[in-house]
């Protein structure tokens, strides 16, 4: 089904015959806040619930905590009187739709679902017949039906599935597809996979997202929707590992892997371009494939070899970056110890301040362990997200000239390549941001 509401023209008025639909969004981070703001723009009355009181206080005064939502857009949502950031669960009373968008980290290699469990327990007492609860957090197939539904039923005293007339409530799963910093594919125009635990739930879940998203894609059950998200990220994870390992071997063989990638990219079919880098980062790629691997091992007793191999390759790319730097310094009769190394970029991707699981962190830590004096420039990452022992600086000609080596880890558009080329004595570029030359090596 395709939404008939254009994503570029937010609704400015709610229905005159009934109150706006009350939506609760649990979690006001990279996933939850864009959803909440979009829903306000489409006429919903939105409660943005989060346990982080500092974040909620910032949101309440129009200070956005994620880059995809500008302060102006957040302020406009607040000005409607229909966006209510809060830490008070009582604000959820009488909700019609609740979306859970909380973190799902790994804890010693095991999926940590405590945030989902806590969110479900908080929401459950406020469920009424006919209400809809949707999980968006990335997780293994079966979480919605086997973990979340029993918590919701126990806390509400109602049964999941069916209709309001028989005392039931709706439950579904819709994987988030937020790509921080992507100005082309946004929350509104990225197709949304939707599912429900039964036919009534699917109708409710799809009907909700059809009011927010240009296109919804229904699937049979929450398990297929849960697997969809893991498939998407495992696909990227495995292919990035492939080109990362190729980059390592190609360098040892004296082959320009980037030229080969460019040439392969001219093929109009049967090939998709992936490029090497210092590792993978963000909430998804370093974590989500391991959810799938864990589930396969737990349920079937088999190892997911592709995922485990990709994990091994990508997790060791920071080691490879440090090794390449050490070799380059050795060629200049310098050791890593005591050297001043400037890192360009601490985020996990270009033009964002998202440093979650960023490969820049282990690279910085390994250099510190070797005795380097590590400094970093990143106009997006706040000082409290900088690794301990690393000095955050501005990218200037003086800073570049004072460095013994510069490592390009993120090619932020705010960085001036000419400035780096003119003043850095040696550069290891992990993104092919600069042309290779006497003082520039490309990963």
Image (cartoon, grey):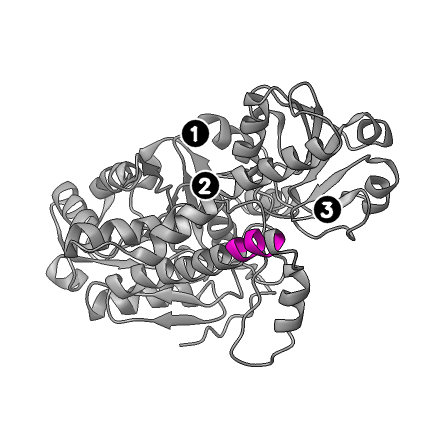
Q: Callout 3: few (<14), some (14-19), or many (20+) C-alpha neighbours within 10 Å?
A: some
Residue marked by disc 2 = 28
Frontmost residue, 287 versus 261: 261
Q: Is residue 238 magenta?
A: no
In the picture, residue 246 is in which quadrant?
Answer: bottom right
N-terminal of the two: label 2 or label 1? Answer: 2
Looking at the image, residue 323 sits to the left or right of residue 196; the answer is: right
Marks 2/1: CA–CA distance: 9 Å
**Residue beneath disc 3:** 441
Q: What label sits on residue 307 in the rendered view? A: none
* Disc 3/disc 1 C-alpha distance (Å): 43 Å
Q: Do tag 3 and tag 1 residues touch (Cβ < 8 Å)?
A: no
Asked if residue 250 is among those painted magenta in the image, a careful observer would answer yes
Which residue position holds label 1?
52
Q: Position of residue 284 (x, y in %)?
A: 43, 49
Q: Give the image location of residue 23, x and y in percent.
A: 38, 50
Based on the displayed image, in which of its 4 quarters is residue 21 positioned?
bottom left
Residue drawn at 64 percent across, 66 percent down: 260
Whether residue 419 is situated above or below residue 187 in the rendered picture? above
Of residues 171 and 361, which is closer to you in this image?
A: 361
Count of numbered marks: 3
- Highlighted range, magenta: 244-251
Instruction: Name the quarter where the N terminus is drawn.
Output: bottom left
Using the image as rendered, state which of residue 371 and residue 71 is in the foreground.
371
Question: Which mark is in front, 3 or 2?
Answer: 3
SS of the residue under disc 1: loop
For mark 2, give the secondary structure: loop
Front-most of residues 369 and 43 = 369
């Amino acid at each position: 089904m395709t939404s008939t509401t254009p994503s570029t023209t937010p609704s400015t008025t709610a229905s005159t015959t009934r109150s706006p639909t009350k939506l609760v969004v649990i979690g006001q981070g990279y996933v939850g806040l864009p959803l909440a703001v979009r829903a306000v723009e489409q006429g919903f009355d939105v409660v943005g619930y989060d346990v982080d009181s500092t974040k909620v206080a910032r949101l309440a005064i129009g200070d956005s905590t994620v880059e995809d939502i500008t302060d102006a857009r957040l302020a406009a949502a607040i000005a409607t009187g229909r966006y209510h950031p809060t830490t008070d669960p009582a604000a959820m009373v009488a909700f019609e739709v609740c979306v859970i968008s909380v973190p799902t980290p790994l804890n010693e290699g095991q999926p940590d679902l405590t945030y989902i469990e806590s969110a479900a327990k908080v929401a459950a007492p406020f469920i009424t017949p006919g209400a809809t609860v949707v999980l968006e957090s990335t997780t293994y197939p079966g979480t919605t039906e086997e973990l979340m539904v029993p918590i919701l039923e126990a806390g509400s005293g109602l049964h999941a599935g069916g209709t309001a007339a028989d005392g039931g409530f709706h439950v579904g799963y819709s994987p988030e597809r937020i790509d921080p910093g992507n100005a082309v594919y946004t929350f509104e125009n990225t197709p949304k996979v939707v599912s429900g635990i039964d036919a009534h739930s699917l109708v409710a879940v799809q009907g909700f997202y059809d009011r927010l998203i240009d296109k919804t894609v229904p699937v049979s059950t929450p398990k297929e929707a849960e697997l969809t998200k893991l498939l998407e990220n495992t696909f990227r994870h495995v292919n990035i590992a492939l080109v990362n390992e190729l980059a390592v071997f190609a360098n040892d063989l004296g082959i320009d892997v980037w030229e080969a990638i460019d040439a392969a990219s001219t093929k109009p079919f049967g090939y998709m371009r992936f490029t090497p880098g210092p590792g993978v980062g963000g909430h998804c790629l370093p974590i989500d494939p391991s959810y799938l691997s864990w589930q396969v091992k737990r349920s079937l007793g088999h190892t997911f070899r592709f995922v485990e191999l990709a994990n091994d390759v990508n997790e060791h790319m920071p080691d490879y970056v440090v090794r390449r730097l050490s070799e380059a310094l050795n060629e200049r009769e310098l050791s890593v110890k005591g050297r001043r190394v400037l890192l360009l970029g601490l985020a996990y991707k270009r033009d964002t301040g998202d440093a979650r699981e960023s490969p820049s962190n282990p690279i910085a830590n390994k250099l510190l362990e070797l005795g380097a004096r590590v400094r970093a420039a990143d106009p997006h990452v706040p000082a409290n997200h900088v690794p301990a022992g690393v000095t955050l600086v501005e990218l200037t000609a003086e800073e570049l000239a004072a460095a013994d080596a510069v490592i390009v880890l993120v090619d932020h558009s705010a960085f001036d390549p000419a400035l780096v080329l003119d003043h850095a004595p040696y550069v290891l570029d992990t993104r092919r941001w600069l042309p290779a030359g006497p003082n520039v090596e490309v990963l």
